[in-house]
Amino acid sequence: MKPKKKYQIVICSSTFQTITHGPSKFVYNYFRSCHKSENFELTVITQDLDHPHKNVIKLNHEYGRYNGFLWEYLDNFKYYHAIQKLDFEPDLIIFKNAILGYWTALKLKTIPVIGFINDDEKLRAGRQFAFFSKQRFHMVKSRFLEKKAAHHLDLVISNSNHLKDYLVSEYGLKKAKLFTLYKGIDLNYFKFKERNAIRKKNPIKVLFIKSDAIRGGLVELCQAIKLLQEFTFEIHVVGNIHRRVRTLISNSFPGLKIHFLGPLTQESVLNLMYESHLFCVPALREALGVANIEALATGLPVISTSAGGIKEVLNNGQNGYMATPGDSVDLSEKIRKAIEDPELTKQQAIAGRKYVEEQFDQHEVFKKFTNVMIDVIESRKGHGI
């Protein structure tokens, strides 16, 4: 469906300039891609703006000492009031985090509102904590608000079919109200590099990228490597790993060479991917796993698990090795297979790059997102609202 006019689109995102995760990167890159669009006029409302930027509105997000734990509710009202103050009426409002769109979707009956749900953390709230804690209280509160928002939004966008099915079962959403949109990457930036067979006598460099190291399976990775005594490994860990977790890992595995590199720029991460032999984030839970996509695009062999949306990235094992989540013995066998069967590993790497080109090309993802926005706008108009 081709748009007949230039639509006014408002995107609400707590982060914009500071790229901290996949959803932030998506908003920033999509904004840049639509900068000269003949179909859209994009306006961003954000809490993350250091200096004035055309079509970007800064939202104040400072809270007092005793109401910071209510930030999700307070931000709901702040975004709603900021939208009401606009000097134009939007054709569509998008929330990068669906929670923050609840009040806007509830109050604005004439403007369609869509929101992203990017992970399953809130869906799982109440199950992962066996006792009352401040963290559990926060997660249950967030789950309540996310579920409310999901039912009032015109459309909920999930980043994997796994997450989509989970939203149906946990929140009781109809599938017609959900749309799967994979996170895309810039294939002009992530160039494919064919790898040589791994030399077993040299240190094997394993790259791990995940700020939540426990959820990402860093403990299981270290356990698996300890089982492979015939090889020498170096583990390079990228992400804002909590100091207590770093200490726990270092003390639990004193004989392993583990380098905690902290958060790095995209360029530094890309260089590490080209320098490494294996990419391994054996996640216990994962909605999708963008880092796996980036590794596949560069030709870096991927070893992960069958958790969540990872199966969709690895094409059920056609693009990489998948171990059982939490099973370090199985993981060690997959690592061994990747090293000792270079022909299979090479075939998977080639298949992985092709699959990324077919499923995760940022340009194609943006086109799908554009079509979804137009469909939501025109569908609302078609119902005479």
Image (tube, rainbow, N blue to C red):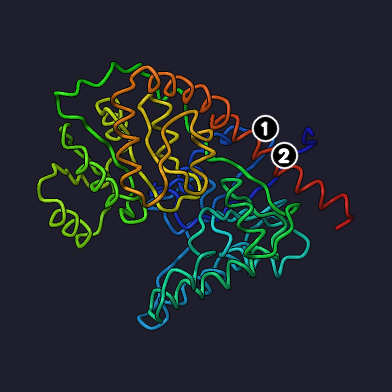
Instruction: Between residue 220 and residue 37, name the one nearer to us.
Output: 220
The reply to whether callout 1 and callout 2 are in contact (CB within 8 Å) is: yes
Q: Amino acid at mark 1?
A: Glu
User: Which image quarter holds the C terminus?
Assistant: bottom right
Q: x, y (%) of residue 110?
A: 78, 61
At 37% from the left and 17% from the top, the residue drawn is: 343
The residue tagged 2 is 6
Dividing the picture into quadrants, the one containing residue 65 is bottom left
Give the distance between the C-alpha atoms of the residues marked 1 and 2, in whole angstroms.
Answer: 7 Å
Mark 2 neighbour class, 10 Å CA radius: few under 14, some 14 to 19, many 20 or more:
few
Dividing the picture into quadrants, the one containing residue 375 is top right
Report whether 382 appears left or right of 199: right
At 58% from the left and 36% from the top, the residue drawn is: 34
Instruction: Between residue 56 and residue 356, name the one nearer to us.
Output: 356
SS at mark 2?
Answer: loop
Question: Label for residue 154?
Answer: none
Report whether 207 appears left or right of 158: left
Seen in the picture, residue 270 relative to 158 is either above or below; the reply is above
The residue tagged 1 is 38
User: Which image quarter holds the N terminus?
Assistant: top right
Q: x, y (%) of residue 107?
A: 71, 70
Q: x, y (%) of residue 131?
A: 40, 80
Mark 1 neighbour class, 10 Å CA radius: few under 14, some 14 to 19, many 20 or more:
few
SS at mark 1?
Answer: loop
Q: x, y (%) of residue 363?
A: 57, 29
At 49% from the left and 38% from the top, the residue drawn is: 29
Seen in the picture, residue 377 relative to 206 is either above or below; the reply is below
At 60% from the left and 30% from the top, the residue drawn is: 364
> Which of marks 2 and 1 precedes in the sequence?
2
